[in-house]
Amino acid sequence: MRMIKVLPLPCPTYLYLHKIEASTSSTHKSRRAFSLSALTISLSALVFSSGNAPTTSISWANPQVPKFLDLPNSGGVKALDLRVGDGETPIDGDLVAIHYYGRLAAKQGWRFDSTYDHKDETGEPIPFSFVLGSGKVISGIETAVKSMKVGGLRRVIIPPSQGYQNTSQEPLPPNYFDRQRLFTTIFNPTRLANGEGATLGTVIFDIELVSLRHL
């Protein structure tokens, strides 16, 4: 069984969100500071291990902090590869299975969902599966998965335009109260009217591409 451990460490994404926040009105400084702290909490180094396999991790001993890169033609999705896979790269029409952690920047990096919490009758975590290119999931996840290889692990920062556009897009937290909290934050009309849309809908996903199947 694959296990995941999150180690809180500094992340350059703080700087990325700071650029977004700086462009909004100065009347919202307190809420901007609140949002800025979210990504420093939620964006951290991941360590995966499987059975007796060697642990794979990012070395933070080097003072040079890894940089997020813009994914081409993604609408602003930024990605950091924590582990490059050695399997196939999916194409539209493939059935892909992923594990993920989903976090909401506007709620101090609140983890609203994780496939590692979705267990089968034996207690094993159940991956989330979807057909690539079907439009079933938010655009940011589709874009991220399209350029991954099976076995890879990628952290992505998804801006509101590539995130949840309505309450039916997947992945959805199975817990009703988590869904309510997620969507009442993202689609809060008062805060959207106050010009906070640049951060309300920003989500961060840690995605592992588990498998793919050509249909």
Image (tube, rainbow, N blue to C red):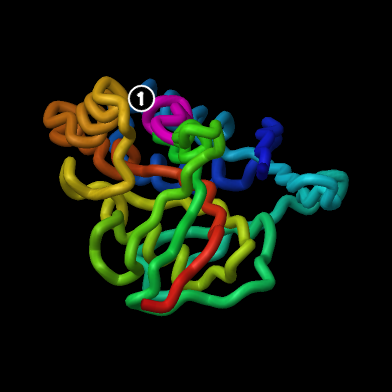
Q: Please tell me whether residue 192 is drawn above or below residue 71 in the rendered image.
A: above
Question: Is residue 112 part of the magenta span, yes or no?
Answer: yes
- Residue 106 in picture, x, y percent from top left: 37, 31
Q: Please tell me whether residue 173 is drawn above or below residue 71 in the rendered image.
A: above
Can residue 70 be seen from the camera position used here? Answer: yes
Which of the pair 87/42 is nearer the observer? 87
Q: What residue is at 41 percent from the left and 50 percent from the top?
A: 128
- Residue 31 in picture, x, y percent from top left: 35, 24
Q: Is residue 188 left or right of residue 124?
A: left
- Location of the N terminus by quadrant is top right
Spot the residue most to the front. Answer: 121
Can residue 18 be seen from the camera position used here? Answer: no
Which of the pair 12/153 is nearer the observer? 153
**Residues shaded magenta:** 106-113
Residue labelled with disc 1: 31
Q: Is residue 60 left or right of residue 170?
A: right
Q: Please tell me whether residue 169 is drawn above or below residue 176 in the rendered image.
A: below
* Residue at disc 1, secondary structure: helix
Q: How many dots with numbers?
A: 1
Question: Is residue 35 part of the magenta span, yes or no?
Answer: no
Q: What residue is at 53 percent from the left and 47 percent from the top?
A: 206
- Location of the C terminus by quadrant is bottom left
Neighbor class of circle 1 (other Cα within 10 Å; few <14, some 14-19, many 20+) is some
Which of the pair 196/28 is nearer the observer? 196
Q: Amino acid at mark 1?
A: Arg
- Residue 12 in picture, x, y percent from top left: 62, 47
Q: Please tell me whether residue 93 is drawn above or below residue 208 in the rendered image.
A: below
- Residue 108 in picture, x, y percent from top left: 46, 26
Q: What residue is at 26 percent from the left and 29 percent from the top?
A: 179
